[in-house]
Amino acid sequence: MAGVFSAGILLAAMQATQMVATKPEQRACPNGIRIEGTIADPTGALIPGAHVESAAGESTDAGADGRYVLLCVAPVPADITAQATGFGSASSKASGPLGTTVYLDLTLAMAVVQTNVQVEAEAPGLDSDAAGGGNELSQADVARLPDDPDDLLRELQTLAGDAGGDPSATAIVVDGFQNGSAMPPKSSIASVRVSPDSFSAERQNPDWNGGRIEITTKPGSESWHGALIFTGSNSVFNATDPFVLTATPSGKRRYGFEFAGPVIPKRSGFSMALEKRDIDEFNVVNAITLAANGMQTPLREAVAAPQRRWIGSARADTQFSTKDIATLSFSANVKNLANQGVGGLVLPEAGYSSLTSEYDLHFTNIETITANLLHQARVGLSWKRTEQAPASTAPGVQVAGFFTGGGAAAFAKSIAKDGKRDRSCSRPEQSCA
């Protein structure tokens, strides 16, 4: 009997404790309702941090588990809205007796993303991604390219390289002639076609090894104009090579002029350009040689490798009729290079100098027969001469992993008995008897 009485007292005490614990919660919102639930996406995944707000102004954010609680919302029914970044908003109504808790789960749909793309008649810049399928550069595009001929050529080779192949093997075609002596002045370029159709009928073979660059020049201007050119850089602005202890002689100077004008207004004109380029480069020798006492001696030296170039071109064009145009052009490129082949383990005495002269004479006649028929005739004459001479005619000495000295190894078979170079060999890779 006593045991039953004790159990009854314990049960009454637990009910009293529960009533005391629930009374404050119920009294916290006597004139509204408590709303709680979860925020999820269409797949059922919970969305943490979603913002939940009632029409009356009460708001909260969902926790890391995607759950939210609005402690007191009044009056009822209450409009509840939830929203989150990357999702659309969702709304629903919650209703229930005053002072109670209402459970409301909301599902947010993925947000709709809209993108506007404006296509202009002429692109504001060059896009190398379009070069793979062929790209034509207008005069405005060409104007944004570098003025330096070497930098201009590298830019075009990079665009052509996107079509596949070695950029350095890119075929350069100027007014229908391939492998000209030099790039034409940028001011004389009318348009550039980069990587056109490799299987076009106008070419005998596809350009498997590299891309193709077709440059079209424009005729002489109807008004007189010209320009003086001077650009330069000095080695004082360059960092010292980490393999040498002294300043490295590096610099570049380019100067010249361009001049064009009419001979007969609206019938014929001419243009000419001449420039001199002094390029001071260097080769770093990092080898181990033998001193007079036979001891190994490290050798670190910056050897100047200067380049001197003359680049000139002249062009004359005439219009025989409205459908017949003839053009005569001449270009020259003379390069003098010193201390070639030097660097790394190759000592200065194992280098050589090179003098290359290239001249091109081209004649082009374009006749428009009908609207669908065009006849183009081209005749060209090219002349190239290369002279190379070793810095030393002594026997070559090569110690693997240490140094290569003596005479240039490429000229070992081109030295005559009298100690002079055999002039019948115009390139180092040639073999001479």
Image (cartoon, grey):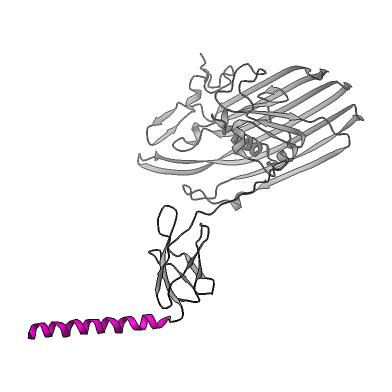
Report if residue 16 lies within the magenta region. yes
Q: Position of residue 197 (x, y in %)?
A: 63, 25
Q: Is residue 215 visible?
A: yes
Q: Position of residue 423 (x, y in %)?
A: 59, 19
Towards the viewer: 379 or 60: 60
Q: Is residue 68 visible?
A: no
Towards the viewer: 223 or 43: 43
Position of residue 277 relative to residue 270, above or below, is below
| Residue lying at 61% horizontally and 41% vertically, measured from the top left | 280
In the rendered structure, which segment of residues is drawn in magenta? 1-28
Q: Residue furthest front?
A: 1
Position of residue 111 relative to residue 330, above or below, is below
Q: Position of residue 312 (x, y in %)?
A: 74, 31
Q: Residue furthest right?
A: 265
Mainly helix, strand or loop, the magenta region? helix
Count of marks placed on residues: 0
In this rendering, position of residue 345 left or right of residue 152 = left
Towards the viewer: 76 or 128: 76
Q: Quadrant of residue 158?
A: top right
Q: Quadrant of residue 315?
A: top right
In this rendering, position of residue 398 left or right of residue 422 = left
Q: Residue furthest top?
A: 433
Report if residue 234 lies within the magenta region. no
In this rendering, position of residue 146 left or right of residue 218 = left
Towards the viewer: 18 or 288: 18
Position of residue 198 relative to residue 103, above or below, is above
Q: Position of residue 327 (x, y in %)?
A: 81, 23
